[in-house]
Amino acid sequence: MGTPSVSAPTFEHHREALGIGEAEPRISFEVSADQGWTQRAYELEIRTADETWSTGRVESGDSVLLPWPTSALGSRESATVRARVWGADGTPSAWSPPADVEVGLLDPEDWLALAISAVGDVAREATAPTLLRREFQIAGPVSRARLYVTAHGVHEVEINGARVGDDTLSPGWTSYSSRLRYQTYDVTALLQEGANAIGSWLADGWYCGRLGFHGGESNRYGERTALLAQLEVVLADGTRQVIATDTSWRSGTGPITASSLYDGEVYDARGEVTGWSRPAFDESEWAGVETVERDPATLVAPDGPPVRCTEERRPLSAWSTPAGTVLVDFGQNLVGRLRITVEGDSGETITLRHAEVLEHGELATRPLRGAAATDTYILAGDGVETWEPRFTFHGFRYAEISGWPGTDPVREVLAGVVARVYHTDLRRLGEFECSDPLVNRLHENVVWSMRGNFLDIPTDCPQRDERLGWTGDLQVFAPTAAFLYDCTGMLSSWLKDLAAEQLPDGNVPWYVPYIPTIPMWTPPEPSAVWGDAAVLTPWDLYVATGDQQVLARQYDSAKAWVELAASMTADDGAWDHGGYQLGDWLDPNAPPEDPIAALTDPYLVATAYLAHSARRLSEIAAVLGREEDQRRYVEVADRVRGGFRTRYLTDDGLMASDTQTAYALAIAFELLDEQGTATAGARLAELVRKAGNKIATGFAGTPLVTEALSRTGHIQAAYDLLLERECPSWLYAVDHGATTIWERWDSMLPDGTVNPGAMTSFNHYALGAVASWLHRRVAGISPAEPGYRVIDFCPNPHGPITSARASHHTPYGTASIRWEVIHDGAALHVDVVVPAGASGRIVLPGSELEVAAGRSQVTVDL
Ligand code: BGC
């Protein structure tokens, strides 16, 4: 037997553990070992500047989120950690590669920096970013330097002319009054002995920029952008030097003359300020700065990775229009911005407009509503110029480019334009593929919609004047998201904001961070499905990772939501009044202008959701050892389930709303008894058949309908729904060229025109929540225990799908399944891999097989 090998440890849910906020970060490692190997013990070695410390041999099979074993780290302190393991034979493995972890600034007192704003930066109408700078001397060779930085607005820092980091739109969007994230950068290599300079671009972003629909509003959080930066330098001789934002900094303007998340950016290259972030720059024309308020106690380290460019895509095709512009197709609806490389005369102006789809051969910009999504570049005219906007993003597949210089703009645009894809730089965990190429494209579309909408916060859509963290959308999508990408850090941060924004009565705002918008959404009113994110999303992250801390942290928030909803129920337990129930939002039967007009009673949805959330909360209480609460929420769940049955179940076992959504909820949330569930399953399958296999569900029913059919033995009906191609169905959009999930089943109408509804996005992940069913039921991989310590492999060969495979990088390593129907449909071959530290169960028609870590294959007759 070969010796096992151990991966470099990781810390909490960080992808990069520099400047973290945990003084005692939990440690995880993965083991690769031969079939049948079992971990008996581990050892962690922690090396800090002062000592090397070891746990010694710890008798344990654990490897995930192990408690920090030694004294807590202090602000700025770093450690190097490695691990090794023992199996049964008593010989230790080799040590893992070392991994570094470094803590950020934990104590408000650590912050010497003051938030500074350019003089005159008050209630600006224009949205031109400012530049801030300062020069300083370093007295000797630098051994280590860190930059801690954040902003009211969004920043991009330069030191001695070089850009710091590769993240964009930092510090992102949080509930700024309670929590403002800062970033930590290792800038050692950028500094030099002698004269140095630091400068920052500073733009409106979410802090001051226009946000919201029907015109929206600017200056939501304050009227001035501000920068808070602290550069800490340690010289070779041990001396510490701190350069922090204060009133000695200077402010100026640069080439960006307007910048907005929704509207885009205007860059006049003639106004570039050469050398502004280098020493010896003449700043005599620059103005001063003023300090603004920012409580350092609200500054927090990030929980997840930042937003970055993760891919570049060249145009698929380009053509000229009768109006003399060039239209470019990138072949994929994506989120990001264009980078252009161009040569022309000074003052020539290139305009870049973006849209997700074309209509009548032109960009369809109506779905963008009030977002101009237009970038403008004015050439300096001094040779080849390369430019990309800095502080904006667009959702687009097509761009219209006007003003491109030269005689053959189509050819030059094809050569000189690239689309750069931006989103939170999450690690990909999950893959899926099956024998049906249309289903594969559907899955690919789900992945792209997640990428486009996981941009610092989980947004509903990335293109129009909205881009808000709608809680319901994320709630239904979270299981899919957690399978596809490691989003626990990012969503933990968002959930902290959710708790911070929760109203005193427990109500969860429609979207987080919350900003007042039109009267319909202000103040927020309780709505099931949306508010249930407080309970169900922490649970989904726990199921994906086994991390109980996310449950503990969100416990009060989850409880407050359930208590509020329970207080709104009638005597019989039904939630039958109050709040503003969005219900089965975007039921395909609702008219385009009235997406709330679903066929399913919104209070049926609310009651079902409350029964489900109360049950989950009792389970959360059990995990956290809160026995009294556990009992209480079992009672609440039982009472509400009773109300559900009394109100919404008729004597003949049908639901009062005889709809796909009503049965899907009743079955998936286990609200009926055994007989009732069977009757509901049969009726659901019948409704699907009667509808000609067309979907009839909105946001509430869609994530559950195929799962409800599978659970009640109507797997054929589930596949019929999945594989239907007429509108409304998942594959209708695929057939109509969709490369992301649409907001509406018919965002594009069969005649190729855009749905007339004012709310028509082509990139909304909610209806893509079916991907979780593809993973769990079609390919058949799911956690049987939180964190995949035990993995269920449950292949579901059926109908025209003859093979499928899926893999997920679990906290223990990669688990995978691959199945294929063989011998002309007579047999099924299943091939699974279980990572070391976990075990699995292969569940087949009529049999169940326990499998240990390693690869297992089985062939059974069908
Ligand atoms: C958003 C949603 C959201 C909904 C709530 C829409 O404008 O795009 O996806 O959940 O409003 O009603």
Image (cartoon, grey):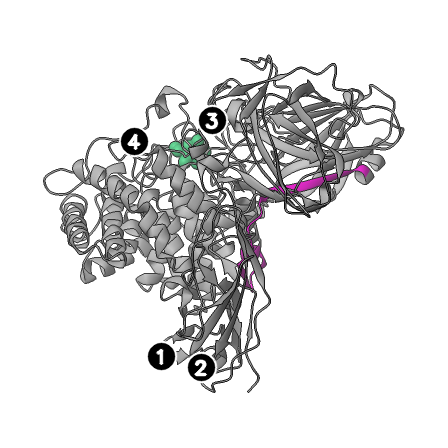
Marks 3 and 4: which is nearer the front?
A: 3
Residue 427 lies within the magenta run: yes
Residue 499 vs residue 537, the one in the foreground? 499
Quadrant for the C terminus, please: bottom left
Horizontal side, residue 695 vs residue 659: left or right: right
Residue 321 vs residue 18, the one in the foreground? 18
Query: Dot 4 lies on which element?
Result: loop
- How far across and how far down the image is residue 647, in percent? 15, 43
Q: Which residues are magenta?
A: 416-440
The three-letter code of the residue at mark 3 reads Arg
Give the Cα separation between the discs numbered 1 and 3. Answer: 62 Å
Residue contact at pointers 1 and 3, CB within 8 angstroms: no
- How far across and how far down the image is residue 600, in percent? 29, 40
The three-letter code of the residue at mark 4 reads Leu
On the question of residue 831 being in view, the answer is no
Marks 1 and 2: which is nearer the front?
A: 1
Name which residue lies at 40% across and 61% down: 67
Residue position marked by numbered label 4 in the rendering = 503
Give the Cα separation between the discs numbered 2 and 4. Answer: 55 Å
Residue position marked by numbered label 1 in the rendering = 847
Task: Looking at the image, tell me whether mark 1 or mark 2 is earlier in sequence order.
Answer: 1
Name which residue lies at 58% across and 32% down: 229
Marks 1 and 3: which is nearer the front?
A: 3
The three-letter code of the residue at mark 1 reads Ser
Residue contact at pointers 3 and 4, CB within 8 angstroms: no
The three-letter code of the residue at mark 2 reads Val
- How far across and how far down the image is residue 665, in percent? 29, 50
Horizontal side, residue 238 vs residue 607: left or right: right
Residue position marked by numbered label 2 in the rendering = 860
Horizontal side, residue 239 vs residue 180: left or right: right
Residue position marked by numbered label 3 in the rendering = 294
